[in-house]
Amino acid sequence: MSLDKATVRNIANLARIEVRDDELDHLAGELSNILTFVEQLSEVNTDGVAPMTAAAAVTLPMRVDAITDGGMPDAVLANAPEAEDGFFTVPKVVE
């Protein structure tokens, strides 16, 4: 697929990329090469190939969703630079 300068200028505008006029020819060639490669990929026969989300079929180990920690607010807040009434205290960032 071959792209002209107007199309490349429009793509750059949509992508909010500033492209100088002297770079349009080179960029048109590069984008055309990329699109040609993508067109070649569409010619690959994928019949019988299942869609996949990863290269390895790995299932994550499951664990029981149970509370195993907690009830230690003093230990948790011990590392806080400031704490009041059992809560973290942070500086105000919105006026």
Image (cartoon, rainbow, N blue to C red):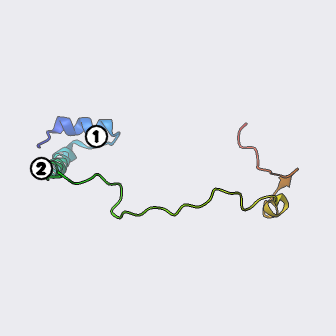
Type of residue at label 2?
Answer: Glu
Q: Residues within 10 Å of mark 2 (few under 14, many from 20)?
A: few
Q: Position of residue 87 (x, y in %)?
A: 81, 51
Residue at the disc numbered 2:
43
Q: Are marks 2 and 1 in contact (CB under 8 Å)?
A: no
> With respect to residue 74, does 43 lie above or below?
above
Residue displayed at 76% across by 48% down = 91
Cα–Cα gap, marks 2 and 1: 28 Å
Type of residue at label 1?
Answer: Ala
Label placed on residue 12: 1
Residue displayed at 14% across by 53% down = 44
Q: Position of residue 3 (x, y in %)?
A: 14, 41
Q: Quadrant of the N terminus?
A: top left
Q: Position of residue 54 (x, y in %)?
A: 35, 59
- Which structural element holds mark 2? loop
**Of residues 62 and 37, the one drawn nearer to the viewer in this rendering:** 62
Label placed on residue 87: none
Residue displayed at 85% across by 52% down = 86
**Of residues 49 and 81, the one drawn nearer to the viewer in this rendering:** 49
**Of residues 4 and 51, the one drawn nearer to the viewer in this rendering:** 51
Counting residues from the start of the chain, the first of labels 2 and 1 encountered is 1
Q: Position of residue 75 (x, y in %)?
A: 82, 64
